[in-house]
Amino acid sequence: MNKSKHDYEWWDYSWNPIVGCSPVSEGCENCYAAGISKRFKLPWGTPEFKPERLMEPVRMRKPSRIFVCSVSDIFHEGVHAEWVDRVLEIIAACPQHTFMMLTKRPENIYRKIYEVTAERACRELGGGDYLPNLWLGVTAENQARADERISILLSVPAAKHFVSVEPMLGPVSLAGFDGKTYRPWLDYHAWKVAFDWVIAGPETGRRARECKPEWIMDVADQCKAAKVSFWDKSHGEFIRREYPREGGK
């Protein structure tokens, strides 16, 4: 487990029972995890399972927010169903913690968590049809990815849904008409019920692409208007704003 070293992080600890990933969209261009992997000669490209790390959350008594697979994507095509099951078993065994899964591949979420096959028997995850301490989220680095991914996320049962607009590569509207299709789930009166949390922040590192302060402030204003929790991950470069103080509803 890695403890957060910065107060702008939205998680307390990161937990990586799976490592390795591959680029899928614009937000992956300057991936911090790929850089770390190259620097320390760690696995990359094809996900790898680290079963020796599974029990780490069990040893922690203090309730914490845990970012699952911060250096991978648990819904990557290369992640085996058995690995996901093992991770879910630990989450179910640790109700004191809140686990947060973030993906750029929402089209794989339902299949990897809920799909029943001959090899995977139907199981009760908890809370009816979802784990009550598991949040599911998508990265929406620009408007195109927001339009593409958010609707898929909201179609999957979860205790809470969240959206990470990071790295923020352009202005993002979470409400209204995108010029082609009206999406009612993004209307203020609809998405304030559908969403539980929104994160926004700039890209970091030497090759960070531009993120204008007004882009983040606009998302913060959208969340405030819709009474949706917002976390500003601006690394102290911009004005910190959080609404309300606690993440989630």
Image (tube, rainbow, N blue to C red):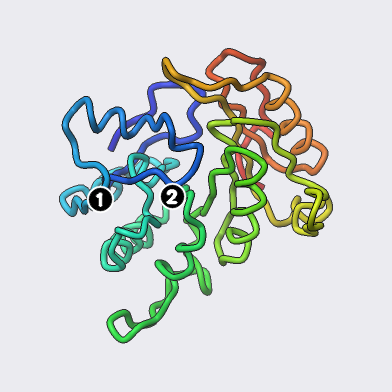
Q: Is residue 12 above or below residue 124?
A: above
- Left or right: 186, with 80 as reference point: right
Density class for disc 1 (Cα within 10 Å; few <14, some 14-19, many ≥20) is some
Of the residues shown, which amino acid type is indicated by label 1?
Answer: Thr
Which residue is located at x 61 percent, y 27 percent? 232
User: Label 2: which residue?
Assistant: 99
Q: CA distance from mark 1 to mark 2?
A: 23 Å
- Left or right: 115, with 72 as reference point: right
User: Label 1: which residue?
Assistant: 46
Instruction: Please give the label number shown on residue 232.
Output: none
In front of the other: 71 or 8: 71
Quadrant of the rendered structure where residue 92 is? Answer: bottom left
Q: Is residue 191 above or below residue 202?
A: below
Q: Residue furthest bottom?
A: 118
Which residue is located at x 42 percent, y 41 percent? 64
Query: Looking at the rendering, in which quadrant would you find the N terminus?
Result: top left
Of the residues shown, which amino acid type is indicated by label 2?
Answer: Phe
Question: Which label's residue is closer to the chain start, 1 or 2?
Answer: 1
Quadrant of the rendered structure where residue 156 is? Answer: bottom right
- C-beta proximity under 8 Å, tags 1 and 2: no
Location of residue 141 in the rendering, given as x and y in whole percent from the top left corner: 58, 38
In front of the other: 226 or 31: 31
Which residue is located at x 31 percent, y 67 percent? 81
In front of the other: 237 or 65: 237
Q: Label 2's element?
A: strand
Which residue is located at x 47 percent, y 21 percent? 204
Q: Is residue 211 above or below residue 136?
A: above
